[in-house]
Amino acid sequence: VANGKYGPFTNTANGSGNAPNSTPTTGSGSTPPFSFPQNPAMSVAKAAGTVTDNGDGSYDVPMTITVKNTGNVPLSTLQVTDDLTTTFPAPSTFNLVAAPTLSAGLTGPAVAFDGNANPNLLSGADTLAIGDTQTITFTVHVVANGKYGPFTNTANGSGNAPDGTRCQWPESH
């Protein structure tokens, strides 16, 4: 799509010529306005790596989140969220070992992600190009306090198509 424009477009053709008797003639025709369809879509996958047992009742859990633009338009105002309080409920406690590592092209939030008070992993100002994949990695330090799992966790994603259509993962229907 040229210059990020999706329409509406109108195409007009003009013609001119001479009739067999040399009389000049002209004509034109136009298409009705049309636009290219915008089908925003994304996927977010999250995987826990190999858990490290620290030998003191605490564990380090590496996490990798992969976000991909699977639609036909770029996604602006990209955001990925992760609420770790639902993953590691009381009596477990958790904290991040370090700030998340983001792929080139992603920017972190103004208030640091902690999976609790701030579940936002991104600034919300990034754009994910068509077909692009980005990753976010971090390690969570968990003190089990008697709760050893199983634990499940889902990261959520969202972004906007050029026409403002909101795209979310997991998809809501």
Image (tube, rainbow, N blue to C red):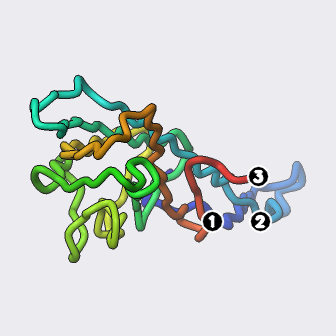
Secondary element type, mark 3: loop
**Which mark, by number, is residue 33?**
2
Q: Secondary structure at mark 1?
A: loop
Number of residues whose C-alpha sits closer than 10 Å to that of mark 1, classed few (under 14), some (14–19) or many (20 or more) = few
Q: Position of residue 27 (x, y in %)?
A: 82, 63
| CA separation in Å, label 1 and label 3 | 14 Å
Against 11, residue 42 (above or below) is above
Against 123, residue 171 (above or below) is above
Q: Are marks 1 and 3 in contact (CB under 8 Å)?
A: no
Q: Amino acid at mark 3?
A: His
| Residue at point 18%, 37% (across, down) | 57
Exactly how many numbered labels are in the figure? 3
Residue nearest the viewer, comparing 55 with 139? 55
Sooner in the amino-acid sequence: mark 1 or mark 2: 2
Q: Residue at x 64, y 49 (%)?
A: 171
Nearer to us of marks 1 and 2 is: 1
Q: Helix or strand or loop: what does disc 2 sit on?
A: loop
State the image coordinates of residue 70 (x, y, percent, origin top left). 52, 39
Give amino acid for label 1: Thr
Q: Residue at x 39, y 56 (%)?
A: 90
Using a 10 Å C-alpha cutoff, classify the residue at mark 2 as few (fewer than 14 neighbours), some (14 to 19) or many (20 or more). few
Give the residue at x 22% y 35%: 62
Provide the residue designation for mark 3.
173
